[in-house]
Amino acid sequence: MCDTLYVGPEAGASSFFGKNSDRHPSEPQAVCIVPRRAAAESVKVGERSFAIQDKGFAYALSKPSWISGGEMGLNEKGVAIGNEAVFSRFKPARDGALGMDILRAALARSESAQDALDFICSWVENNDQGGNGAYRGSLYYDNSYLIADASGAFVLETAGRRWAWRAASPRDAISNAYCITKDYKRLDTQTRKEIAPVNESAACSDEADPGRKGEKESWRAHVENRFQLRFTRADRRRALSLALLDSGHEGAFGAAGQAPVLSMFAALRSHGGYDPEKPHSKHMESLCVHSGGVPKTATTASMACEWRPDGTVLLWFTGTSYPCLSLYKPILLSNGEFMPLCDASDASGNACGLFAEGSREAYKRWSAQHAWIRRHSKPFAGIALSSDPAFIASRDVAQTELAMIAERAATEVAHGADRRMLDVLRREVGAIVAGWEKDQGLRR
C-alpha cells in the first residue's frame, strides 16, 4: 500500500510532491537515473512495448528490484508521478500492464503533467492493465496516479479500461482507495454515458458543462470494490495526509525558520495514531508503515520533489526502508540535467544510495540497512529506534544540514555559478550522510 501527497504553488513559494512506497518488507527497492536515449517509435518497459513515442527523456526512478517499472519518479522536464494500487469491481487482466510500467512509460515521453495525464488516459482506455504486482504471492489491482509539475497537478483514477480525473487541490493526497466522487473533470467515454449522461448535441467539453440529460453520479461509488477498504485503511491514511499538510501551516507550506521541504519529510515519516511498538494495532493507519501487521507490508522507499520558483527542482529520496529511520538525499534537476548532490565515491562506500539500474551494489546496500533495522528491532514489537528522542534529534540535525546545502546548491546553479562549487557541496553532503550512518552503526 502507498500514499502520495501534494502541495501546490503559492505566491513566490515552492510546490511539493511526496510519496511513500509500501510493499513487502523483504522486497529491495533502489533509485536509479535512466539517462537520455535516442527517440524511438515505442517505449520498451521490460518485456512490454508501449505503442507511443519514447522521446528519450532522462528520469529518476524508484523501483522494486525485480520490476522494470517504478513506484515513483521525476523526469528531466520536471514531471513527477506517483502510483497507487486501487481495487475496482472490474477484474484486472492477469497479463495486463502494471501501473508501475505505465508510470515509467509516461516519464519517458511526457513534457508536462497534462501530457502525462493525456497519455495514461488514452492508453488505459485502449489496453488492459493488471499483472501480478506482488513480490511474493499474487496481487492484481487497478491504479491511481498523482501527476505533477511546476504549474500544478492532477489526480487520475482508473478501473479496468475506465478512468476519471480532476485537478489536484492546493493540498491534496491519494491512497489506496478511490477519492474522486462527483468532482471529476473528465471521464472515459463509456463511464460518461453511465454516470454523467449528456446531450450529445450540446457538445460538452467537460463534465461540468451544461446540457446534461441526468444528474451526475459518483465515480467512486460506480467503480470501487468496498471489500478491500477493510484491509487498506486507505481513507484513514488519506485523511491523515491531508491533516498533516494543513496542520499548523497558514500561507506558505512549512514551519517558519526552516526549509519548507522538511515539512514534507515530517509528513512522510508520520506514524499518525500507530505505535511502532505495537505493530498489530492500527498497522495500516500510518504513513510510515512498519512491518508486523496484516497485510504484510512496510514502507520500503520514499521520495519527495520540490519545484522552486527559480526553475530548479530538488528531488529527495531515501533509497532505504522506513523514512522515519532514514535520511532523504538530494538530486538537483536544472535545465534538463540531473545532478546528484551526494558524493558516491567516498572510502566508506556509496553514501548516496543512487545506483545504475540493476546494480548489485544497490541490493548490498539495501541488505546492510535491513540488517541494521533488525538489530534495532524487538521480536514482534516494531522498531523501537523510531521513537527514540536522541535518534530523532540526530536525524533531524543531519536532515536540516542537508536541506540547507541543497538549497544553496540550487540557488548557485540558478544564478549560473561555477559548477565546481557543486563538487564542494556534493562532498559536504556525502560526509554528512556517511558520518550520520556511521554514528548509527550502518557503516564500519
Image (tube, rainbow, N blue to C red):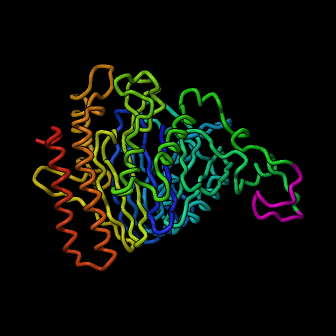
Residue positioned 55% across, 63% down in the render: 152
Indicate left or right for 405 with 25 as reference: left
> Which x, y percent locates residue 312?
38, 69
Residue positioned 24% across, 55% down in the render: 401
In-front residue for pair 390/224: 390
> Which x, y percent locates residue 302?
38, 46
Indicate left or right for 133 with 443 as reference: right
The answer to which image quadrant residue 76 occupies is bottom left
> Which x, y percent locates residue 297?
42, 31
Indicate left or right for 136 with 391 as reference: right
Q: How many numbered marks appear?
A: 0
Q: Quadrant of the C terminus?
A: top left
In-front residue for pair 300/39: 300
Magenta span of residues = 201-214
Residue 210 colored magenta? yes
Residue positioned 54% across, 52% down in the render: 171
Residue 305 colored magenta? no
Residue positioned 75% across, 61% down in the render: 206
Main SS of residues in magenta: loop
Vertical placement of residue 228 versus 175, above or below: above
The answer to which image quadrant residue 334 occupies is bottom left
> Which x, y percent locates residue 223?
70, 40
Vertical placement of residue 424 versus 258, above or below: below
In-front residue for pair 219/122: 219
In-front residue for pair 333/247: 247
